[in-house]
């Protein structure tokens, strides 16, 4: 699903955010990217989302060589990825339903099919009764779950999450992680950037450890590349 | 790692699907509709600001529109005056058979459209009735007025009219020939100059409207930059992101067009009284015509198009700069 081949990212300031990173994540696999803040977790996700371009190396996502992606293809590429933000990035001027429906509306789904999918996604995160409410009327945990519903409503093959539990208490965090596990069980590849070591350690999934832009550990293989 | 054959086909399929969005016509129309309705609702949500912006645009549009309408009315007035565009031939000859011969010659001339003969008696009666000198005229021993032929030329071309005038001057028994064509030509020339001016004004103010709407839309884009980032991250194309702003510009244009039509109607209403009085003193009946239904519709459409273009300028300049970081 994801393949990084000797990928480096150097910012114009000279800071090397990622250096010679290589790894591969299979279809339906759930993996964590861990490390201190500034270790390169966010940069890694931004490269996958094509918010940033690598300085060197090759990346393949969903069979697509990202270096060959044109600007006009970019939106269609992004539709194949669900993205969960730490601060959920909901639109506060519209309802929960409309927030979740946004990716479908953008992709041009028929309204009836869109409604079916939105309700399925909201049901999955347990917020079906709150579809008419505005995000600000919800708790932080509920807002994050709306963000997750929006990320999965389009049935993406890949789900990315950037510190999805950063603002949540341990109980809610575990609940959110449980949701991600369920998605991976139905074949979605999930990559979660998180520095919540205690939580991740308990979940026994693969762990990619970054330190100062280098991949220093890969839990599934027990060592660095 | 090389991809296995079956993986490669899947990969290629996925790559192909990136280029071919599965957007149906119905869904595309639904997207347009929701963008149009949503942008209109946003504008109506802030009625005061929207009204102010529309009024600014309306004033800019009303100025050239009023001028063009005024000129159009003036031209239709000019064509109504064509009957005054005649050549008067005053005769020294008073002998009826000789006059009849001249009248025949004139009617058969191919440069002449129509000839009207006024006898001295008819002229006198008309003069008495209209000028108010009736009593003074009654004291005269004999009718001082000559027989007159009113000749309407077949062509309005100045050179042809001049040829006709000199031909008329050469006819036997003619005293004087008077052609009133010059002031008509002058009026037409003045209207043409004013029309050119109005068009240039319309061009300048049209550019002004585009800039005003462009700036308004730029502010709208800045206000919604967070939303734009999210939309781009969940796969919104440039066209999808731009669409609500293009409709915003369109609605501003239509609002400005409406304001302009109201202003022009007010202008016509205010002008028609004094104008009618002025023209009545020239013995001319005159009413100002407004743009009418189709004209009004054309104004709205044109204003909407200007708004769309203004928004497009803004979108092209500012929307690309807002990228997820």
Image (cartoon, coloured by chain):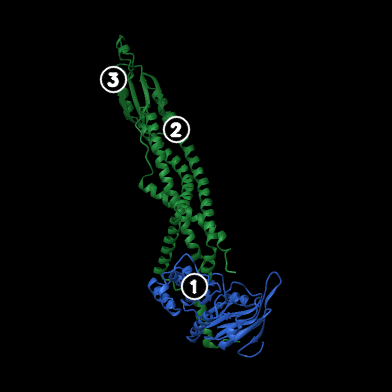
Q: Nearer the viewer, mark 2 or mark 1?
A: 1
In the image, taking residue B201 as reference, residue B170 lies left or right, namely left
Q: Specify the label residue B187 is tagged with.
A: 2
Front residue of B313 and B40? B40
Chain holding disc 1? A
Residue located at (42% from left, 43% from top): B263
Front residue of B16 and B26? B26
Question: Dot 2, crowdedness within 10 Å: few (<14), some or many (≥20)?
Answer: some
In the image, taking residue A169 as reference, residue B66 lies left or right, namely left
Q: Specify the label residue A176 is tagged with.
A: none
Question: Dot 3, crowdedness within 10 Å: few (<14), some or many (≥20)?
Answer: few
Chain holding disc 2? B
Secondary structure beneath disc 3? helix
Are discs 3 and 1 both within one chain? no
Q: Position of residue B114 (x, y in %)?
A: 32, 30
| Chain colored blue | A
Residue located at (44% from left, 74% from top): B22
Secondary structure beneath disc 2? helix
Residue pointed to by mark 1: A139
Q: Quadrant of residue A211?
A: bottom right
Q: Specify the label residue B122 is tagged with.
A: 3
Q: Position of residue B103 (x, y in %)?
A: 31, 24
């Amino acid at each position: 699903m994801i393949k990084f081949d000797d990928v480096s990212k150097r910012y114009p300031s000279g800071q090397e955010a990622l250096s010679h990173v290589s790894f591969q994540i299979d279809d339906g696999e759930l993996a964590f990217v861990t490390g201190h803040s500034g270790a390169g977790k966010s940069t890694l996700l931004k490269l996958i989302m094509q918010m940033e371009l690598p300085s060197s190396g090759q990346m393949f996502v969903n069979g697509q060589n990202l270096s060959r992606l044109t600007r006009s293809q970019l939106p269609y590429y992004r539709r194949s990825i669900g993205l969960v933000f730490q601060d959920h990035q909901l639109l506060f001027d519209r309802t929960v339903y409309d927030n979740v429906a946004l990716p479908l509306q953008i992709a041009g789904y028929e309204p009836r099919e869109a409604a079916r999918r939105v309700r399925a996604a909201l049901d999955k995160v347990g917020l079906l009764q709150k579809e008419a409410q505005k995000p600000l009327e919800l708790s932080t945990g509920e807002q994050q779950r709306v963000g997750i519903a929006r990320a999965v409503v389009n049935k993406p093959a890949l789900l990315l999450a950037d510190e999805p539990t950063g603002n949540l208490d341990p109980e809610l965090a575990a609940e959110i992680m449980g949701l991600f596990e369920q998605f991976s069980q139905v074949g979605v590849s999930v990559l979660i950037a998180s520095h919540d070591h205690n939580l991740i350690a308990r979940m026994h999934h693969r762990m990619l450890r970054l330190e100062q832009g280098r991949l220093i550990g890969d839990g599934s293989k027990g060592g660095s590349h | 790692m090389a991809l296995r054959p079956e993986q490669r086909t899947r990969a290629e399929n996925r790559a192909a699907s990136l280029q071919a969005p599965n957007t149906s016509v119905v869904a595309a129309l639904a997207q347009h509709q929701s963008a149009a309705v949503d942008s209109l609702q946003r504008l109506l949500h802030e009625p005061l600001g929207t009204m102010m912006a529309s009024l600014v645009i309306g004033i800019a549009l009303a100025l050239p529109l009023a001028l063009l309408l005024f000129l159009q009315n003036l031209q239709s007035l000019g064509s109504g005056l064509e009957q005054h565009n005649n050549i008067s031939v005053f005769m020294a000859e008073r002998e009826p058979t000789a006059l009849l011969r001249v009248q025949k010659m004139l009617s058969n001339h191919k440069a002449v459209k129509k000839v009207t003969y006024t006898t001295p008696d008819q002229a006198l009666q008309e003069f008495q009735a209209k000028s108010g000198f009736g009593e003074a005229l009654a004291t005269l021993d004999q009718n001082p007025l000559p027989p007159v032929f009113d000749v309407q030329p077949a062509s309005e071309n100045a050179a042809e009219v001049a040829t006709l005038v000199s031909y008329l001057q050469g006819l036997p028994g003619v005293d004087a020939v008077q052609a009133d064509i010059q002031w008509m030509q002058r009026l037409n020339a003045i209207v043409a100059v004013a029309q050119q001016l109005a068009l240039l004004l319309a061009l300048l103010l049209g550019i002004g409207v585009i800039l005003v709407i462009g700036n308004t839309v730029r502010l709208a884009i800045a206000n919604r930059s967070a939303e734009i980032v999210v939309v781009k991250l969940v796969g919104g194309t440039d066209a999808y992101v731009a669409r609500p702003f293009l409709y915003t510009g369109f609605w501003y244009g239509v609002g400005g067009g409406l304001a302009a039509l109201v202003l022009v109607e007010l202008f016509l209403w205010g002008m028609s009284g004094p104008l009618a009085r002025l023209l009545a003193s020239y013995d001319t009946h005159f009413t100002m015509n407004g743009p009418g239904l189709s004209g009004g519709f054309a104004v709205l459409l044109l204003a909407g198009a200007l708004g769309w273009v203004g928004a497009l300028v803004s979108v092209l300049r500012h929307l690309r700069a807002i990228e997820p970081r």
